[in-house]
């Protein structure tokens, strides 16, 4: 387990938080950015608001000076994914996700298409899945085994970071050390509801386990006062 105080001395606690703008409209997303921009520098744009507002929402959030984690979880034939990666890089986003389940050829095609120092992140197993659910998908491995298998393939291909649940940090961190970024969704402060997450931890627990970035959505965005929610999370991380 890493020394949390040392980690937070090197990087401000707020820089470890990526706020997920999982809202239905461009206006709601930009309202959240406006409320939180003084506290938070990184925002995740996912399928919901991207489908509603298109690339314009990316440009608008970048226009505030914030960084953008574009979470589209690309999963298609290698050529199609490569062209999508090119388009995302042209937008100027700092991070983009692809599904490692797309296979090594797809991952390598994606990596060959990136530019502008964009980090490519590999999604392993969704945090909404549990052991029963992956059995229903025909996967006989445990979640940990599946995460490890996909992570090894992605890292060998040259991926910049991995998306894993908090409970798989201890699976991938010892394998790859600090050479790979670990970005963790499924974060729920003790005072919030788990929602549809099956494998989650508190912010403090995830940082202690070795996460580099925490993706936090509803505990902040659905809170009556999002700024207050961020403040509470930062206090927990700095405690």
Image: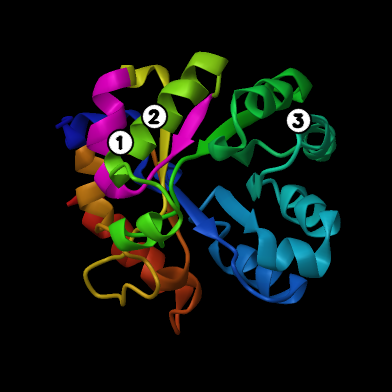
Instruction: Look at the image and name its color scheme.
Output: rainbow
SS at badge 1 = helix
The CA distance from mark 1 to mark 2 is: 6 Å
Q: CA distance from mark 3 to mark 1?
A: 25 Å
Dot 1: few (<14), some (14–19), or many (≥20) neighbours within 10 Å?
A: few
Q: Place residue 104 in its image quadrant.
A: top right
Element marked by disc 3: helix
Q: Regarding mark 2 in the picture, which secondary structure is present there?
A: helix
Spot the residue most to the bottom.
224
Q: Main secondary structure of the magenta part?
A: helix
Whether tag 1 and tag 2 are in contact, CB under 8 A, the answer is yes
Q: Residue at x 56, y 48 (%)?
A: 42
Quarter of the figure with residue 201: bottom left
Residue 149 disc label: 2
| 79 lies left or right of 127 | right
Q: Residues within 10 Å of mark 2 (few under 14, many from 20)?
A: some
Vertical side of 1 occupied by 237: above or below: below
Q: Residue at x 29, y 27 (%)?
A: 173
> Which quadrant would the N terminus be assigned to in this image?
top left
Which label is found at residue 145?
A: 1
Residue 80 position, x and y percent, is: 82, 37
Name the residue rendered at 49%, 15% in the picture.
156
Q: Position of residue 73 (x, y in %)?
A: 62, 47
Residue 19 on the magenta segment: no
Q: Is residue 230 left or right of residue 1?
A: right
The residue that mark 3 highlights is: 78
Mark toward the start of the polypeptide (3 vs 1): 3
Residue at 29% from the left image edge and 56% from the top image edge = 131
Within the magenta stretch, is there residue 165?
yes
Q: CA distance from mark 2 to mark 3?
A: 20 Å
| Start-end of magenta stretch | 160-175
Foreground: 102 or 215? 102
């Amino acid at each position: 387990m890493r020394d949390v105080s040392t980690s937070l001395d090197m990087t401000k606690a707020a820089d470890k938080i990526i706020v997920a703008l999982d809202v239905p409209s461009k206006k709601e997303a930009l309202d959240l950015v406006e409320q939180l921009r003084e506290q938070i520098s990184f925002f995740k744009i996912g399928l919901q608001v991207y489908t509603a507002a298109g690339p314009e929402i990316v440009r608008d959030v970048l226009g505030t000076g914030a960084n953008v984690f574009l979470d589209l979880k690309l999963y298609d034939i290698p050529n199609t994914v490569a062209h999508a990666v090119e388009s995302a890089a042209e937008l100027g986003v700092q991070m983009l996700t692809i599904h490692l389940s797309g296979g090594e050829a797809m991952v390598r095609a994606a990596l060959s298409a990136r530019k502008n120092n964009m980090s490519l992140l590999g999604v392993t197993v969704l945090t909404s899945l549990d052991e029963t659910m992956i059995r229903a998908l025909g996967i006989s491995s445990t979640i940990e085994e599946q995460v490890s298998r996909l992570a090894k393939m992605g890292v060998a291909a040259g991926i910049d970071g991995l998306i894993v649940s908090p409970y798989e940090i201890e699976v991938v961190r010892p394998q790859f050390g600090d050479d790979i970024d670990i970005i963790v969704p499924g974060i729920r402060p003790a005072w919030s509801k788990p929602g549809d997450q099956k494998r989650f931890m508190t912010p403090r627990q995830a940082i202690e386990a070795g996460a580099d970035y925490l993706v936090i959505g509803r505990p902040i965005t659905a809170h009556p006062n999002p700024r207050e929610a961020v403040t509470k999370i930062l206090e927990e991380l700095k405690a």
